[in-house]
Image (cartoon, rainbow, N blue to C red):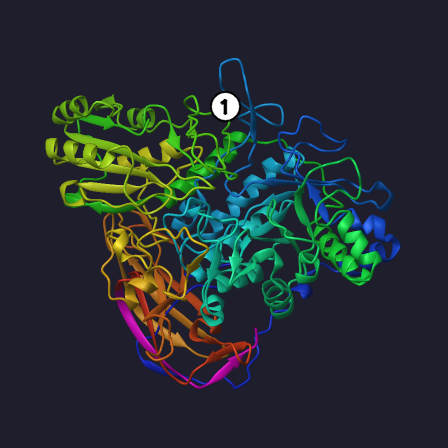
Amino acid sequence: MTMRRPWGSRFRCGASALVLALLPGLSYARPLSSSQPSGVDARVERLVREMPPEALHQLVQSYFMAGQAKQPPGSIGAAGYVPAMPAYGIPALQENDAGIGVNNYPVGIDARGWPVGVRGKAGDATPLPSTLALAATWNPRLAEAGGRMIAGEARAQGINVLLAGGINLTREPRSGRTFEYFGEDPWLAGAMAAGEIRGIQSQHVISTIKHFALNAQETNRLAISSDIGERAMRESDLLAFELAIEQGRPGAVMCGYNKVNGIYDCSSAHLLNGVLKRDWHYPGWVMTDWGGDHGVTDALAGVDQVSGQDYTGSDSGKGSFGAPLMHTIAGHTIPLSRLRDMARRILRSMLANGLFDVPPPKPVDFAADAKVAQDAEEQALVLLKNGAAQLPLDGRVRRIAVIGGHADAGVLSGGGSAQVWPVGGPAIKPVHPDLHDSASPWIVYDPSSPLRALRQRLPQARIDFADGHDPARAVALAKSANVAIVFATQWEAEGIDLPNLSLPDHQDALIAAVAAANPHTVVVLETGSAVRMPWLPDVAAVLEAWYPGGRGGEAIADVLSGRTNPSGRLPITFPRNERQLPRPFVTGGASVDYDIEGAAVGYKWFDRQKLAPLFPFGYGLSYTRFAYSDLKVSTGPRVTVSFTVRNVGGRAGMDAPQVYVGMPAADGEAPRRLAGFDKVDLKPGGQATVSVTIDPRLFAVFDVAADHWRVAAGRYTVEVGHSSRDFTLRGNVDMEAASIAP
């Protein structure tokens, strides 16, 4: 059986050395404008010619409406609002945060002391697992399904632009927004983000991609400069954006708050006009993050719309792109043609994604949407340790102690603009952390109880709960049980970084005490990033659940009980400690040096430095075993790798085989790069043929002087394995020199 991906990446690798002749000067330029539906450009041009400058100007600034007491006609109270222009048939833009689900901003407190949502009620959205959890599925089809689900719920509320598609690479695992992004590798992040974007835009809703670029930490995020060389940036963070934009074709790109090499993202003509619009031929529009603009000259740098302006009731407004923009156009400092281009890009994305001709929204099926969230979490759960086959729990287990993590009530979610107020409201009264600079005032637990779900799935067992606040009681309960399950949590939020990678609130000590009392201790981690595990040798099993989403409790219980075979793989490296990171401490100064690792982000850094991580990128266990064989490499315009995956264990399960390309030692940023992957579902004894075509840029380095990708002549290794540190098949490819146009 040959499995095929909609984005054209499946793999197989040949064991023999093969010669691939790429023609010098071979061009893979990808003009994105060619993807526009027939007639869109002509319709846009008619509109732009018809509209006077004052009308064009109305498109280039959005107003912040969330939580505002006074709403203008047509606003639904979303994060951004661009009024409709009925005279030209142009609908309003209603822009909202929704990378993990529709954010219904809590803006008030009711009589019980609970936050109240902005659009009528709190609790009208389905939270997916965190974006990092989606990356852990290694399954872009699930990301696409999640995008469709979110967009359907958004359209039902009148939202037509989603501020989704977070793709900043995990250079700093302590970043408060790690949970919002798709991990540390450009190919994985690009494929997964593209899937989510395609799903969103299939529902007549525009998706952004963000935050362009190098927005890798929250500490001093409004002013810090991410300093890095051009080649390293092109081969890492910018490559992730490039791949996701090509495969997902988002309608808008959001530039970030930070600086890159001393210039603010939203003021960088190099990034916006040079890389994005010239080199990548991007036809959509660039919007700023809220408050991310730095003056009217951002228009000359490539910004097309300033986001989140204060609404004054005036069409011109007071922000960078309000009256100041029209004054500079009148004075010919900024040409009128630039204003037309700004409007043209916005209108093109609106038309291409059906915002002018959108059909009525369908009623929301929250039960079906919850199933989408549960399916994603089941494939996101990563089994990190399973000593003596402790899991899955079976009918012989008669007494179970469940400890900590509010497992009796729900599962943790991340904070900030990605926060989703879940259907029915939070599981417990939200906690206000009162943290300086935090963009989220609440710690929210989604109402999906792992304890309740376990009791339903294991009716033969007595399952008792202790909240973990009294370690002595937790230890006594663990001693009385056959198995102890400790739920540990690590909360993250936009606006703040983690102080370190240790579990907070003395949870490490709690786990160690429970493990000393019961050798059959299972740890379930609800975290937004990697964590240290000083207790790892003493526990029987570890399950990484991330932020599990709207049906996370059920998904966790299904894996613990064996109804579901875990198939998640790590999208980030878990270090043993912070000393293994390029920067042992989060940088709080005016700049952060990313040239320390350059393009060697995550596992590439660990490989280059010859460091042994706690758990490597791509790692994850299963209740069955998979074997790879029959490696083949075929050549042509591109290298295609294929191999056979067999389930050689006794349970049905899913596998995520991975293909890596080894760079010539003198030219690569690290020993190897992820070049492809797949997700296959096999019964015991079943097998599948996996095939992937490798993107030529994964054999290349970026030649800054020539402004193109360059494949150096030489021998390249192709490896297939279970993680970035576990390979079973190897082959070689001899390649001639070639160039690849950006």
Work out whether residue 204 can be spotted: no
| Nearer the observer, 107 or 479 | 107
The location of residue 328, given as percent across then percent down, is 79, 57
Residue 120 placement, left or right of 589: right
Q: Residue 571 appears at what percent x and percent y?
A: 37, 53
Task: Say if 421 sits above or below 207 in the image.
Answer: above
Give the residue type at disc 1: Gly
Is 708 on the left-hand or right-hand side of 294? left
Percent coordinates x, y for residue 117 in the rendering: 57, 26
Magenta stretch holds residue 736: yes
What quarter of the picture does the N terminus occupy? bottom left
Residue where numbered disc 1 is placed: 424
Front residue (pair 616, 482): 616
Main SS of the magenta segment? strand
Q: Is residue 238 above or below residue 485?
A: below
Q: Secondary structure at mark 1?
A: loop
Across and down, in percent, residue 241 comes to: 53, 60
Which residue is located at x 32 percent, y 63 percent?
Answer: 605
User: How many labels, in total?
Assistant: 1
Label 1 environment density (alpha carbons within 10 Å; few <14, some 14–19, many ≥20): some
Q: Is residue 692 magenta?
A: no
Query: Where is the C terminus found, in terms of image quarters?
Result: bottom right
Quarter assignment of residue 559: top left
Q: Which residues are magenta?
A: 727-742
Taking depth in this image into account, of 517 and 6 the one nearest to the observer is 517
x 82%, y 42%: residue: 85
Residue lying at the far top of the rendered structure: 111
Q: Relative to 387, is 123 above or below?
A: above
Left or right of residue 437: residue 94: right
